[in-house]
Image (tube, grey):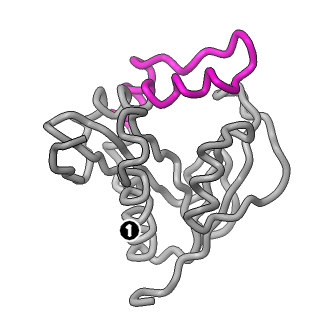
Amino acid sequence: MGDELVVRRATAADADALAEIVVDWFASYLEFAPAGWKAPDRLELALGFAVQLQTADRWCWIAEAGGAGVGQVAIMPVSLSRVPVDEPDLAHLSHLFVRRSAQGTGVASRLLRLAHDEARAAGFTAIRLFTPADHARARRFYEREGWKPLGERFFEPPIGLDLIEYRVQLAPKGV
């Protein structure tokens, strides 16, 4: 990557850059997605980000190198996710996407640590996420970072893929 990485809180003005990062990452899904699978539309993603970034109870950060977005991470209370559960101490990691050109550079690990720190600071004791069940690279990454798969595969209509839940317990501050 070469350029210094800057990570900052995303704003509604970053919606298009966040969508571009997601679209780039979704291109990797073609390696395992069923024939005919289509990635979400970039414009719809950007509009969704613009709306979500207006709320105080969703946190999103963008990583930039050379002024361009290379990664992003977002968390929220699990009660606000598409699959809510009654676990007030549980955060939901709704996004962790890194441009394919930035894979292997440490950007994803840095963003994930930030999400852990911010969730802990907000009073959460654990985080969950959903990732495509057939995305071997993503699953290896999360498992290497200490996340554990939980439960069975389930189909997620908006994404059009089987997903699997992962969770991680957050260590107390200072541990």
Q: Position of residue 135 (x, y in %)?
A: 66, 38
Span shown in magenta:
23-51
Above or below residue 120? Residue 97 is above
Q: Residue at x 41, y 53 (%)?
A: 58
Q: Position of residue 37 (x, y in %)?
A: 67, 16
Quarter of image, res 12: top left
Percent x, y of residue 119: 44, 69
152 relative to 174 in the view: left or right = right
Q: Is residue 38 left or right of residue 59?
A: right
Mark 1 surroundings within 10 Å by alpha-carbon count, few (fewer than 14), some (14 through 19), many (20 or more): some
Residue 43's quadrant in the figure?
top left
Please provide percent x and percent y for residue 114. 37, 64
Q: Is residue 27 above or below residue 123?
A: above
Q: Residue at x 20, y 34 (%)?
A: 68
| Residue labelled with disc 1 | 118
What residue is rendered at 45% in x and 68% in y?
116
Give the left or right position of residue 123, taking residue 37 as reference.
left
